[in-house]
Image (tube, grey):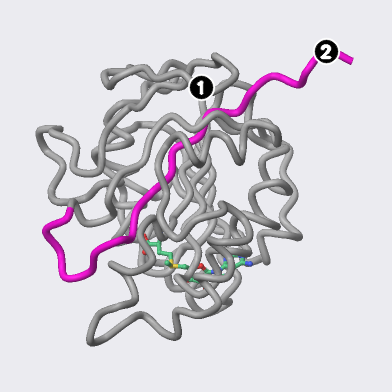
Amino acid sequence: MAVNRVGTTTSDASGAKSTVISGLAPDVPDHRSSGFRAAIRHITLPSEARILEVGGLSGDHTTIHLLDVFDNPIDIVEIDEERASNLQSKYDNDPTTKDRIRLYNSDAMDFTSIHTYDLLIIDMPTGSIDFGYEEILPNISRYLSVGGTAIVYTIYDHAAAYDVDDPPGNGDQPKAFMLSFFGAPTLTVERVDERLRPTGFAAIGLVDRWMLKGHRKGHGWVCLEKLPLPAA
Ligand SMILES: C[S@@+](CC[C@H](N)C(=O)[O-])C[C@H]1O[C@@H](n2cnc3c(N)ncnc32)[C@H](O)[C@@H]1O
């Protein structure tokens, strides 16, 4: 898999290189105010590659862009039975998606596959972002190829997300998670890289979820590259 890196290259304290594929509001034509779309526009997938998505819901936030930007098949894991069933019907009834999308009604922690994927999306509900990083990413990324990309929904600025009139739930738990997991209530590519590189992922990008134009601020996507296992 190739990532067309267009951003600035930075070095962390150990001298390891990480490359920012896009900033918080990347100047990508055709982004439709979606940081997710802007991020995936930097990724080139081989024709035989497969995409794995955790979190189906309506498909209107991420899947719609995956279908449009790539030609590859997409497997979606959705824990809610009704959502999974509705989504499968929706895609089966459309001849352009019928043969490309397969829904798995399962907890991502129980999902197994015979496939290896080149692109993994983890789009958990806002209150479960911690679960996405601490449990799902380490578990399900066994199906991600080395050099493959994982894109994980995140809060990157806790104050911007929660110190607002209508926050998305109680911010105490997300703040405690950001402090304990990342060591700060705000994220940068460098901070994510420092935290996740020892676990086998280089941080290659951080983009705003709604390109800083939407109603909600401080929500984004962390883009990671799976690293080879260190030599024994
Ligand atoms: C933010 S929504 C996903 C939005 C979706 N990507 C879209 O384009 O509409 C999160 C979804 O994750 C599902 N979910 C929550 N926990 C899960 C788990 N452990 N395994 C699989 N899906 C889960 C929820 O039921 C919900 O539908």
Does residue 206 lie above or below 106 as drawn?
A: above
Instruction: Kindly state the secondary structure of the residue where label 1 is placed.
Output: loop
**Where does the image place residue 222, in percent across and percent down from the top left?**
43, 44
| Residue in view at x 49 percent, y 40 percent | 191
**Where does the image place residue 43, in percent across and percent down from the top left?**
36, 26
User: Which SS type dominates the magenta stretch?
Assistant: loop
Residue 195's image quarter?
Answer: top right
Q: Are marks 1 and 2 in contact (CB under 8 Å)?
A: no
Nearest the viewer among 150 and 100 is 150
Does residue 20 lie above or below 167 as drawn?
A: above
Foreground mark, 1 or 2, reads 2
Look at label 2 and name its amino acid.
Ala
Look at label 1 and name its amino acid.
Glu
| Residue in view at x 67 percent, y 35 percent | 115
**Where does the image place residue 68, in percent across and percent down from the top left?**
26, 40
Q: Which mark is residue 48?
A: 1
| Residue in view at x 55 percent, y 23 percent | 13
Look at the image and give the residue range highlighted in magenta.
Answer: 212-232
Mark 2 crowd level (few <14, some 14–19, many ≥20, 10 Å Cα): few
Q: CA distance from mark 1 to mark 2?
A: 28 Å
Report if the beta carbon of the residue with label 2 is closer than 8 angstroms to ligand 1: no
Instruction: Kindly state the secondary structure of the residue where label 2 is placed.
Output: loop
**Is residue 214 covered in magenta?**
yes
Judged left or right of residue 231, residue 207 is left
Residue 66's image quarter?
Answer: top left
Q: Which residue is mark 2?
A: 231
**Is residue 170 covered in magenta?**
no
